Amino acid sequence: MYTSITNRRSFIKKMAMLSAMTAASTMFPGILFAEEQERGLPKGSSLNWKKAPCRFCGVGCGVLIGIEKGKAVAVKGDPESTVNKGLCCVKGYHSVIAMYGKDRLTKPLVKKSGKYVETSMKEALDLIASKMKETIKDYGKDSVSIYGSGQWTIPDGYVASKLFKGCIGTNNVEANARLCMATAVTGFLTSFGLDEPMGCYEDIDHANIFVLWGNNMAEMHPVLFSRMLDQRLTRGAKIIDFATRTTRTSVAADKSILFLPQTDLAVGNAICYEIIKNGWVHTSFVEKYCNFSKGLTNMGYGLEDNYKFKDKPEKIDFETYKEFLNDYTPEKVEKMSGVSAKDIKYMAAYYGDPNKKVMSFWCMGPNQHSRGTWMNNIIYNIHLLTGKISTPGNSPFSLTGQPSACGTVREVGTLTHKLPHGVVMNKKDREFAAKIWEVPVENIDPKPTYHTVEMFRALDRGDIRFMWIQVTNPMVTMPKLKRYRDGANKKGRFIVVSDIYQTPTTDIADVILPSAMWVEREGMYGNSERRTQYFEQMVDPPGEAMSDTWQLIEVAKRMGFEKQFYYQEETHIEEIYKEYRKHHVGKKHNMAPLEVLKKQPGAMWPYVDGKSTKWRFNSKYDPACTNGEDFHFYGKPDGKAVIWQRPYEPAAESPDNQYPYWLCTGRVIEHWHTGSMTRRIPVLHKAMPHSYVELNPGDAKRMQIRTGDKVKLTTRRGEIILPAAVNQRGVPAPMQVFVPFFDENILINEITLDSFCPISKEPDYKKCAVKVEKA
Amino acid sequence: MRKRFGIISFFVLLFIAFIAVWNYSYYQGQEGAYIPIEKNYLAPMIVSESDVFKRSEYALDYADMSIDENHERSIKSYYSNRAYYGAPPSIPHNVKDERNMGGNSCLKCHENGGFVEKLKAYAPITPHPEMVNCRQCHVPQQTQIVFKKTNFIKGSLPLVGTHNALAGSPPVIPHSLQMRENCLACHAGPSAPKEIRVTHPERINCRQCHVSNDKMMEDIGIFIRNIKTNE
């Protein structure tokens, strides 16, 4: 974009051209950038560029992968993609290196007297099928289970659900998304009756204010954060970072507001209080489109085995809700949250200003929260009270962390209570699924079994005897890890792990299957904005590595379900997707046909009459609205969204004299999830070689701890020693510490707490009490 | 009498204070010499986040700025006034005021840059304007004649354009970031050496794509699984 000065006249001419170019580049940020990247490529290379969604996070950037001589050798942002407009993050740019780690699994390994022995794929699959049949015979169908993740492609999750729920007849299907997105789901279902955001990323181009609720987007969703920064530069949009810790995001934000852990509930209610007190409520919107409800309180924290909770919603009126909010005046909340009344009013004023479009972003902060569903409800309350929803730029936006957490886990429904369309508890939904799956309807069990934490508890207890784990790493991610690792290692448990590298989870396996990853096979992912994206097979998988979809199909056939698993090897992905689409027929959730997905960088469901739906529930954009009004929240029977009365309740474990600090865990930009892929990318490993504990500089000084010193963290679950980081990547508030969880050599989850949100059953990884000492 | 009492009590107080101070310093003196033993610790290579977004308010100006090819710096001239890679640059021009702190002198040109007619050059922008005692590290070169010749070798300098892991992928940051967390100071604007001038200064979240990999400081090597924790 630079020009040179040669003489005055040409200079003036160039300046004029340049400002036009700048205007163009700001209107389509990134597009010029991708061209620039192209210019940086070596001349005369014979790269063949093919499009795919990025392998890593839920943003779902469009990438182009350069293939040369059957190997993936380069990555660039896809300028055609409306998600990232040609720009990636450091993980995306280096993602293809993850396929070429020296220790890639290429052959199945079977544990024989404590040692892993190489075997053929056929033998390994035979063994898995026979072991599964044997376990069902000896212990019943609910003794076998499958545990996947939002990294499953849509076909992976679909065949897993069909095999376990439709054919075997057990609801023991869960996914890592329970540890990550389950709260977002229950938040959507309780407030709107339908899962997934109503808006889309385009909201970023319209909003004036971005409020980030406990969301370090500069590191975790960097591409979207860059889009926000672009909007700030060009339109003067404002970014407010509302968090418990000072991060790169806080530094970039226009305002950084820190709150004490768990008090976001109170601050959210205080914002609602201010909105009502100052008359900023969009009265006609609330009257027409909203109901008020309250649920049970004092729900507990799920710390005990077989904990059960079912909310009892009860309708209330606006007056009751107003009265309830009197406990949450900014002045009262200031005392408990550490957020000044001024700052609460500041945030409320932006939400309340009818001339400002506000976008709220959140991800693991409100989701991994022992009152997470409530917190999601409260954010929706703010947007519903002010009517700032489902219109361009007014958007409560729940982000995801895995490439297909939405596409596979939430839409295909690989959770114990879910079916691809609807839930197992509903007779009609069961009949609908059974018909498409061509199984007797009695096969589908109407009772959900175990959510993730309870599933691993059941494995420990012996209620579950067989577990197949695909594309995820629970032996790094489970909270209170030791119990679940010891449980999995008990005698009489048979664990199958499909992965691409050895991980702490393959260490507990009886059979390790080598998987084909990402573009070594064909598949689809669904990102956070309801966008389904297709990728073709671009390179060959190493050795005998096989896609997770085909592994499941092979085992299903061996178990006698040839009729349901009729797919041909060459065309199975297409056949599966066609079958899957049948579950979502209708204006509310129609999926784009495969031909469309192959042509363009994804399409957003509901895909109706050849068009993606950008804003759901808004009759201007969403053909599923039928009530003749401007908005129709058709997820609820009466077409109204719900404003929930949700109080503040403390966390399951708060600091005390013995364990005086808060422990929070999370991620860093360089590593994705448990690092089993990103740590095998030298650029990323070298930039972030190991985990650490971040301390507040004041606390560190008092304890005479400097960066690099060894620090011992002790909780009621155990202890761990790791190096300190003072004033480095992030700065926690006083009496709080933060540890990233990516490092399998420093397993922070050994000491985290397995409390969870009673409604969503998602664990709270962000809060437990810890003792901090210099080691 | 009253006057005398005042004087006496003043001296009494002074004496008490003397006793107290003497006592304290005596006990302090009793303490043995103490040299803290430095533990050989593994310092994480996480670079500081301070200043990451500094100067980003000028990003669009940088993007719009035209480049004066006749007066731009090159990486060669950039290294020429550094004793070795990473050393503080010496001051290549006369310094008018010997007794001033940076805020009043150096920063006038080096905080925001600009063309200096007299030197026919653009003033480089400092990445750490908060450190105002400039002359602590940066010294002018008053003479080109050396006292005695040296065998010191400058060492190899990192090359430009060799830091991509893949064709076309964003280069890693090959240098230490200590006091250089603010990327735009050196990598954007008319004073930036042309070889390392960023083509996209408007993308201010630099470390979204460019991560640190400072081999000169420490080569970290590749990821190794620690089998011990998995018994």
Image (spheres, coloured by chain):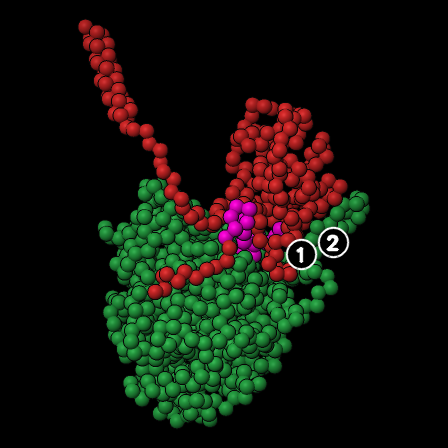
Q: Position of residue A58 (x, y in %)?
A: 49, 67
* Chain letter of the residue carrying label 2: A
Q: Viewer-proximal residue, A238 or B214?
A: B214
In the image, the segment drawn in magenta is B200-220
Q: CA distance from mark 1 to mark 2?
A: 10 Å
Q: Amino acid at mark 2?
A: Met
Q: Position of residue A462 (x, y in %)?
A: 27, 77
Could you say which chain is coloured green in the image?
A
Q: Secondary structure at mark 2?
A: helix
The answer to whether B148 appears left or right of A374 in the picture is right
Q: Quadrant of the N terminus of chain B?
A: top left
Question: Residue at horizontal 59%, vertical 29%?
Answer: B139
Q: Amino acid at mark 1?
A: Ala
Q: Secondary structure at mark 1?
A: helix
- Have a look at marks 1 and 2 and say if they share a chain: yes
Kindly identify which residue carries mark 2.
A17
Tell me the tag on residue A23.
1
Residue A397 on the magenta span: no
The answer to whether B137 appears left or right of A555 in the picture is right
Q: Colour of chain B?
A: red
